[in-house]
């Protein structure tokens, strides 16, 4: 019984941290610049995608953008992306986003963000309330499991379920 209680407390602590982190990341990403965090960094403008300037974005223009992104990540030019190349490309994007965040929110100019300088989560409270289905002010193990299942279902619905449950 004590093991279950410890596990439930750990789950509640985990989801509380997750909710807070999700709120910060969501707020930060949405304010970091055009496109926010997104799947591929900043989203290009219409003008950047309409490379021939004809007022329409063609399928070929989108494909060319994807090919250019691939070529940039393929540092050795072999036409394949290794794990190392994908990690490097992700780190470059993360570095750019972090630098933009510091530039935007560093109000005292010290080159770092204090907790007070971070953007306040806009949706964390609502997310917590949705998970706390019974309105008790806390998230039970059952509510945590239901939220986890809903998120798993949401990812499956979008066709990108990459979760591996090791519980």
Image (cartoon, rainbow, N blue to C red):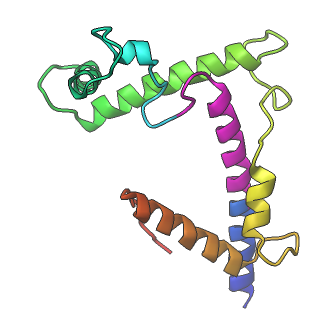
- The residue range painted magenta reads 16-37
Most prominent secondary structure in the magenta stretch? helix
- Magenta residue check for 153: no
Q: Position of residue 33 (x, y in %)?
A: 60, 21
Q: Position of residue 112 (x, y in %)?
A: 73, 19
Q: Position of residue 38 (x, y in %)?
A: 50, 35
Q: Is residue 109 left or right of residue 14?
A: right
- For the point 60% across and 23% down, the residue is 98
- For the point 51% across and 75% down, the residue is 167
Q: Position of residue 37 (x, y in %)?
A: 54, 33
Q: Is residue 84 visible?
A: yes
Q: Residue furthest left?
A: 78
Q: Is residue 151 left or right of residue 159?
A: right
- Magenta residue check for 34: yes
Q: Quadrant of residue 145?
A: bottom right
* Above or below for 164 versus 3: above
Q: Is residue 163 visible?
A: no
Q: Quadrant of residue 51?
A: top left
Along the line of sight, which residue is nearer the eye, 109 or 25? 25
Along the line of sight, which residue is nearer the eye, 133 or 138? 133
Q: Quadrant of residue 159?
A: bottom left
* Above or below for 111 versus 166: above
- For the point 51% across and 27% down, the residue is 94
Along the line of sight, which residue is nearer the eye, 160 or 81? 160
Q: Is residue 65 left or right of residue 165?
A: left
Q: Residue furthest front?
A: 55
Q: Residue furthest bottom?
A: 1
Q: Is residue 80 left or right of residue 38?
A: left
């Amino acid at each position: 019984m004590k093991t279950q209680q410890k596990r439930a407390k750990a789950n509640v602590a985990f989801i509380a941290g997750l909710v807070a982190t999700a709120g910060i990341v969501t707020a930060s990403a949405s304010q970091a610049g055009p496109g926010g965090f997104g799947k591929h960094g900043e989203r290009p403008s219409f003008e950047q995608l309409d490379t021939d300037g004809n007022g329409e974005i063609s399928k070929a223009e989108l494909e060319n953008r994807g090919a250019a992104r691939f070529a940039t990540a393929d540092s050795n030019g072999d036409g394949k992306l290794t794990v190392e190349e994908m990690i490097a490309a992700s780190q470059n994007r993360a570095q750019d986003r972090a630098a933009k965040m510091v530039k935007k929110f560093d109000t005292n100019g010290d080159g770092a963000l204090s907790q007070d300088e971070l953007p306040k989560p806009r949706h964390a409270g609502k997310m917590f309330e949705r998970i706390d289905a019974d309105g008790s002010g806390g998230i039970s193990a059952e509510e945590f499991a239901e939220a986890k299942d809903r998120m798993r279902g949401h990812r499956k619905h979008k066709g990108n379920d990459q979760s591996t449950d090791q519980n």
